[in-house]
C-alpha cells in the first residue's frame, strides 16, 4: 500500500474513475493558496451534464461496494486511517497552504480525520444490522425482519474552513454505510478532497465509489437536482442550505442533512474561574482564524467581572501571534481569501460607525514572509447593543464581542435571542446552575467550563436555523442508510 501526496494541481482537481483528472469546462474559477495569497491553478467548473455523468459512474460502482459486509468495507477504511496517519505531516502542510490555518491546528484536523475512518470502520459491523419480529400466528409461521441498506449514491457539498476534515465527516460514514459518493468542495478550498480520493484508491476502494466534482453554486445545484442522488449532506451557510433543501425536493424527495452557520453565546458567570474562561474565549473566537461554525463570538460577561475580564484578556492577547501559519509558534494564520477578509473588516467598520469600541485588532496585517496573504488581527469589541448587525449576524472571523449582563434569566433570554442554534458555552463553578442553564440554551451542543471540544462519538449539529441532522456519532451512520421491512409467511 503506497501513497504519495501529489502537490501538482495541474494533474487536475476532479476525481473519478479512481483517479485525479480534469474536465473540459467553459467556465473556470481561480484556486487561491490562502497562506501566500497566490493563485495556484484555474479549475474548470462542472455543469449539469458533467455532474450527471459522474453521478452515473458512481451509480454503476455502488452495488459492488454496497454488497460487501461492513467488516470488508471496514478493512478499506482502516487502511485509509493508517495512510492518513503515515502522511500526517504532508497532509497538514497541504491544509495550511490551502486554508491558511496554523500548522499546529492542521495536525489536529488530520489526526481527527484518521480517527473518523477508524471509528466508522469499527462501529459499522455492530450498527448496520436488522431486527426480527414475531407476528401473531398459531405455529410461529409468520414473522418480519428488517435490513439496513445503503441509500445508493449520496451527494456531499462542503464548506472551506476545514477542507479535509469536514469532507471526511461526510465520506467516512457514507462509505461505511455502503454508499457511493459525489463530493463537491467549496471552490475556495477545492484540493483536499482530491487528495482524499488518492488515499482511498491506495487503500483499495473500488473505482467510481468516491468522486469529486468542482464548481460553484450551479454545480451544487446540479447535484441536488440529480434524481439518482439519494441524499444530500450539506455544510455551509443558512442561505445556501435553504436552496439545497428546496432543490432536493424539486425533482425527487431526498433526505437532506444541513450543517449550517451559528452565532454562539459564551456566558461567563460571576463565579467563573477567570483565567480558564479567558483561555476558552480565545479558543472559542480565534481558533482557525475564527472561521469556525461554533465560534462563540457573543461573549456575555457578568457585570461584576467585565473590567477584570477585559483587562486580563487584553493582556493575554498581547502575546497572540498572527503570522505565517507554517511557523510552529503562530496562533492565528490567514483568512481564506480577499473577499472574506473584506467582509470581516466591513463588520468591524460598520459596528464602529454605530458606536462600538474596538479594544484591539480589527485591521488587516501583513506578516513577514507572507505579505500577500489575507491576514486579520483578531478584534475585541465592546460598547455593543444586542440589535447591532455585528451582534446578530454570523461574521465567521476572529471577532470577540463583550456583552455585559446582570442575571441568569436575562442572559439565557439574550443568548437564545437568535435564529441560530449551533453551540453555546458557559463558565461557572455552580454545578446546579451549569446544568440548569445548559438545559435552557437552545443549541445542538453546549460546553460547560470548556469550549469547542469535538469527539467522533458525540453527535454534532444544529438547533433552529443552524440545520438538522447530526454528524459524527452512530446517528450519522444511520442517516446514510435506509431500513427495509420484510414480512414473511412460511
Ligand atoms: P456557502 O453556503 O457559501 O457555501 C457552501 C457550499 O455550498 C460551497 O461548496 C458552495 O459552492 C456551495 N453552494 C453555493 N450555492 C449552492 C447552491 N445553490 N446549491 C448547492 N450548493 C451551493 O458557505 P461557505 O462560505 O462555504 O461556508 C461558511 C458557512 O458554513 C458558515 O455559515 C459556517 O458557519 C458554515 N459551516 C457550518 C458547519 C457546521 O458543521 N454546522 C461547519 C463549517 C461551516
Image: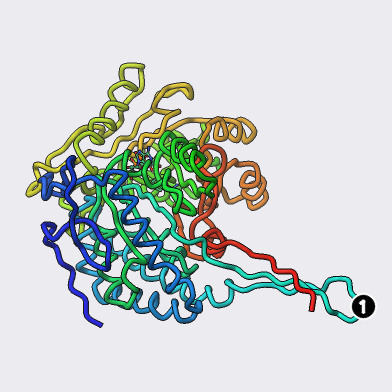
Q: Is residue 156 visible?
A: yes
Indicate the quadrant containing the C terminus: top left, top right, bottom left or bottom right: bottom right
Q: Can residue 308 be seen in this view?
A: no
Q: Which residue is drawn at 44% across and 56% down?
A: 154
Q: Where is residue 305 in the image (x, y as percent from the top left)?
A: 48, 37
Q: Residue at x 22, y 80 (%)?
A: 2
Q: In this view, does 108 lie above or below 351?
A: below
Q: Name the residue under label 1.
A: 138
**Residue at the extreme right:** 138
Viewer-nearest residue: 123 or 55: 55
Tell which quarter ligand 1 is in: top left
Disc 1 element: loop
Q: Which residue is drawn at 18% across and 34% down?
A: 364
Viewer-nearest residue: 98 or 294: 98
- In the visual, does 275 lie left or right of 132? left
Q: Is residue 171 above or below residue 271?
A: below
Q: In this view, does 430 lie above or below 5?
A: above
Q: Is residue 36 above or below residue 455?
A: above
Q: Position of residue 148 (x, y in %)?
A: 60, 68
Q: In which quarter of the image is residue 375?
A: top left
Q: Is mark 1 within 8 Å of ligand 1?
A: no
Q: Which residue is drawn at 51% across and 50% down?
A: 461
Q: Where is residue 252 in the image (x, y as percent from the top left)?
A: 51, 45
- In the visual, does 216 lie left or right of 66? left
Amino acid at each position: 500500500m503506497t501513497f504519495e501526496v501529489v502537490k501538482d494541481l495541474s494533474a487536475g482537481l476532479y476525481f473519478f474513475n479512481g483517479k485525479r483528472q480534469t474536465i473540459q469546462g467553459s467556465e473556470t474559477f481561480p484556486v487561491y493558496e490562502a497562506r501566500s495569497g497566490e493563485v495556484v491553478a484555474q479549475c474548470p467548473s462542472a455543469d449539469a451534464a458533467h455532474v450527471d455523468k459522474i453521478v452515473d459512474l458512481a451509480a454503476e460502482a455502488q452495488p459492488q461496494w454496497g454488497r460487501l459486509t461492513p467488516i470488508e468495507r471496514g478493512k478499506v477504511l482502516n487502511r485509509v486511517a493508517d495512510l492518513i496517519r503515515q502522511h500526517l505531516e504532508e497532509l497538514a502542510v497541504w491544509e495550511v497552504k490551502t486554508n491558511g490555518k496554523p500548522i499546529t491546528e492542521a495536525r489536529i484536523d488530520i489526526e481527527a480525520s484518521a480517527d473518523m475512518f477508524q471509528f466508522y470502520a469499527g462501529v459499522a459491523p455492530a450498527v448496520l444490522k436488522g431486527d426480527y419480529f414475531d407476528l401473531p400466528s398459531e405455529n410461529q409461521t409468520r414473522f418480519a425482519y428488517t435490513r439496513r441498506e445503503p441509500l445508493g449514491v449520496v451527494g456531499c457539498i462542503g464548506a472551506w474552513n476545514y477542507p479535509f476534515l469536514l469532507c471526511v465527516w461526510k465520506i467516512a460514514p457514507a462509505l461505511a454505510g455502503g454508499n457511493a459518493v459525489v463530493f463537491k468542495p467549496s471552490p475556495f478550498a477545492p484540493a483536499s478532497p482530491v487528495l482524499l480520493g488518492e488515499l482511498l484508491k491506495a487503500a483499495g476502494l473500488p473505482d467510481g465509489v468516491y468522486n469529486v466534482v468542482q464548481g460553484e453554486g450551479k454545480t451544487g445545484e446540479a447535484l441536488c437536482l440529480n434524481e439518482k442522488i439519494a441524499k444530500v449532506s450539506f455544510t455551509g451557510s443558512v442561505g445556501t442550505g435553504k436552496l439545497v433543501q428546496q432543490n432536493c425536493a424539486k425533482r425527487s424527495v431526498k433526505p437532506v442533512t444541513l450543517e449550517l452557520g451559528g452565532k454562539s453565546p459564551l456566558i461567563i458567570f460571576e463565579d467563573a474561574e477567570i483565567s480558564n474562561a479567558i483561555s476558552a474565549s480565545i479558543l472559542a473566537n480565534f481558533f482557525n482564524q475564527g472561521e469556525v461554525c461554533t465560534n462563540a463570538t457573543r461573549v456575555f460577561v457578568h457585570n461584576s467581572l467585565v473590567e477584570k475580564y477585559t483587562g486580563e484578556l487584553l493582556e493575554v492577547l498581547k502575546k497572540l501571534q498572527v503570522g505565517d501559519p507554517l511557523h510552529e509558534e503562530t496562533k492565528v494564520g490567514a483568512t481564506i481569501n480577499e473577499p472574506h477578509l473584506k467582509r470581516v473588516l466591513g463588520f468591524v467598520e460598520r459596528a464602529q460607525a454605530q458606536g462600538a469600541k474596538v479594544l484591539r485588532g480589527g485591521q488587516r496585517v501583513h506578516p513577514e514572509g507572507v505579505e500577500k496573504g489575507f491576514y486579520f488581527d483578531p478584534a475585541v469589541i465592546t460598547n455593543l447593543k444586542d440589535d447591532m448587525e455585528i451582534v446578530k449576524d454570523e461574521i465567521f472571523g476572529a471577532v470577540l464581542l463583550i456583552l455585559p449582563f446582570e442575571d441568569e434569566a436575562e442572559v439565557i433570554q439574550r443568548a437564545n435571542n437568535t435564529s441560530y442554534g449551533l453551540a453555546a458555552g458557559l463558565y461557572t463553578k455552580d454545578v446546579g446552575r451549569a446544568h440548569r442553564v445548559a438545559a435552557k440554551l437552545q443549541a445542538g451542543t453546549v460546553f460547560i467550563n470548556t469550549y469547542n471540544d469535538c469527539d467522533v462519538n458525540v453527535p454534532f449539529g444544529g438547533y433552529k436555523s443552524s440545520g438538522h441532522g447530526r454528524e459524527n456519532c452512530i446517528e450519522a451512520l444511520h442517516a446514510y442508510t435506509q431500513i427495509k421491512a420484510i414480512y414473511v409467511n412460511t
